[in-house]
Amino acid sequence: MRRHMPSSLDFFGSRENEEDNNSEKVESIPSEEDNEIEQVEEAKDEDVRWLRRRLRIKVEGDDIPDPWTSWSIPLRHHKNILAGIEESRWIEPTAIQMQCGPIVINKIDCVASAPTGSGKTGAFLIPIAAALEDNDEENALILVPTRELATQLYFETDRILSRSKSRGRICISTPRRALDKKRYTFIILDEVDKLLDVTSDSISFVDQAVASARCKCLFSASITTSVRELATTALNDSMISVTVLSPHETEALSVVQKFIFVGRGNDQNKIATLRELILSGKLKPPCLLFVNGSTRAQSLKYKLKSMSDISSSLSRRVEALFVGTKKKKSTQHKNYERDEIIRNFRAGRIWFLVATDLASRGLDFRALNSVLNYDVPFSATDYLHRVGRVGRAGRSGTAITLFSQADEQKCDLRAIANLALRSGAKVGIHVPEWLLRLPKKKKSRHNEMSQVESKKRKNAQVENNQDEDTNYDVNKPQQQDKPPIKKVRSLVSTASSNTKKATLLQKLHLKKMKRKKR
């Protein structure tokens, strides 16, 4: 029997020539069965393209798996997971779940973007659970930016995977609490744009964790420059990009957005407008009110409580959710206090919740009726996340933004107004035309505002985890605070100068006394 030369040793291409000669002698005639298979595959590819166009799914990459059209077929061997899905009333997968499900379960790196409330959690949680059930040695780490989001995701996982044996091998954490050297099969970065923004001191851990995992997936409602850089450096070359077009093709259509001008930068005008909105019923509870900073949140909370003439029980139905800064630890809410506030708001015991951007990412308040931007967000991305808290899962809602003349200099109102027009044109949009004619914001100023806001978020996140992440080593002596040498020297110099002045005054006084005696 004649042996063929390996292709690695066939320097002169003799095997190719031999195959060409053989192909000339024998002509392969396709059978009817082969033609039928090709026709079926072409029809299937056309159906997949039609489904993606209908659901507005944009994919980029090679060897992209076909989207799931139901839960039952791909998860037919995972009865416990299907039972949890049925109990959660997830009748059929959403657009992001259809496309990301087969990608994650096949351990392919991906970066996925979809609007808020589109089911991104199920897009990675369900396929991860199925993959872990097939292999007992695999595990997963899900990183989220805030403790509140981690708590919400934990209860969501516990509810859906209550019967699955893979539940115990899924770790949900913030980066500051996951500083270990454990290797994970799956690494999921949820709300990755916010995650990269607030964890500058934990970026090295994020890079190490992503590099060591077999499957890395980035999920967010908006893909920023930092997310793209992380995707190109940390993900494999075979990664797949999935985008469910947003915001105007999705649930944002069910949110009525209004912009109300309150004159100059005066809080009295904003409070008067807020009072009128509550009395007229345009701001229906439960309502989420956003401000820029913890001090503003506490101030607005007390102003709302003082409106007892509107309703006698209003003072008991108002609360604030924020994180204090290092300078004002007295205003900081403890972890258990924030959890209690969120539970009361979801249960309907709180009608108006004043919050910072801490509540604008990931937290799911499905019964929310309205959102009020008491302070204008600094960027269009922050506006998108704030408004995304209402109108989730096809519900209707209202988003109102109060803006003043001073906000034209601080915030990118033109970009926010254009985003609102694109996202809510089919439902009803109330944007003053002169907002669209504002001069385009300079990049330098915009970057400056974004840096200021990111610093606020970083300080808030550090203070949020300060009591959890403080570690002491009993074997090492603790460093004592060094005395302020410069201040001590300045005090000594001032004291010495004061003594010199005192001695001079005494000498002058003695001279005067001598003259009088003469």
Image (cartoon, rainbow, N blue to C red):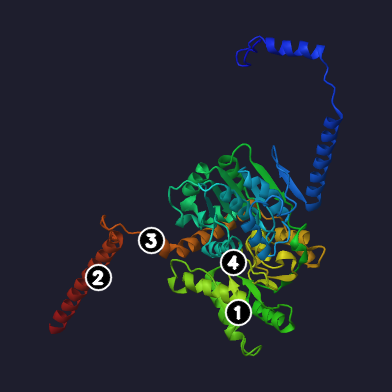
Q: Disc 2 or 4, which lies upstream in sequence?
A: 4
In which quadrant will I find the C terminus? bottom left
Amino acid bearing label 4: Ala
- In front of the other: 289 or 260: 289
Q: Which residue is mark 2?
A: 498
In which quadrant will I find the N terminus? top right
Q: Which residue is mark 1?
A: 350
Amino acid bearing label 1: Ile
Q: Disc 2 or 3, which lies upstream in sequence?
A: 3
- In front of the other: 425 or 235: 235
In the rendered image, residue 229, in percent from the top left (x then y), is placed at 59, 43
Q: Disc 1 or 4, which lies upstream in sequence?
A: 1
In the rendered image, residue 417, in percent from the top left (x then y), is placed at 73, 62
Report the residue at 25% width, 67% height from top: 497
Measure the C-alpha gap from mark 2 to mark 3: 44 Å
Q: Secondary structure at mark 1?
A: loop
Mark toward the viewer: 2 or 4? 4
Crowdedness near tag 4: few (<14), some (14–19) or many (≥20) residues, C-alpha within 10 Å = many
Residue 84, placed above or below residue 55: below
Measure the C-alpha gap from mark 1 to mark 4: 15 Å
Q: Which residue is mark 3?
A: 470
Judge left or right: residue 430 versus residue 407. Answer: right
Amino acid bearing label 2: Asn
Residue 112 visible in image: yes
Q: Are marks 3 and 1 in contact (CB under 8 Å)?
A: no
Q: Of the numbered discs in the image, which one, if any, rests on residue 232?
A: none
Q: Of the numbered discs in the image, which one, if any, rests on residue 359?
A: 4
Judge left or right: residue 28 versus residue 450. Answer: right
Mark toward the viewer: 2 or 3? 3
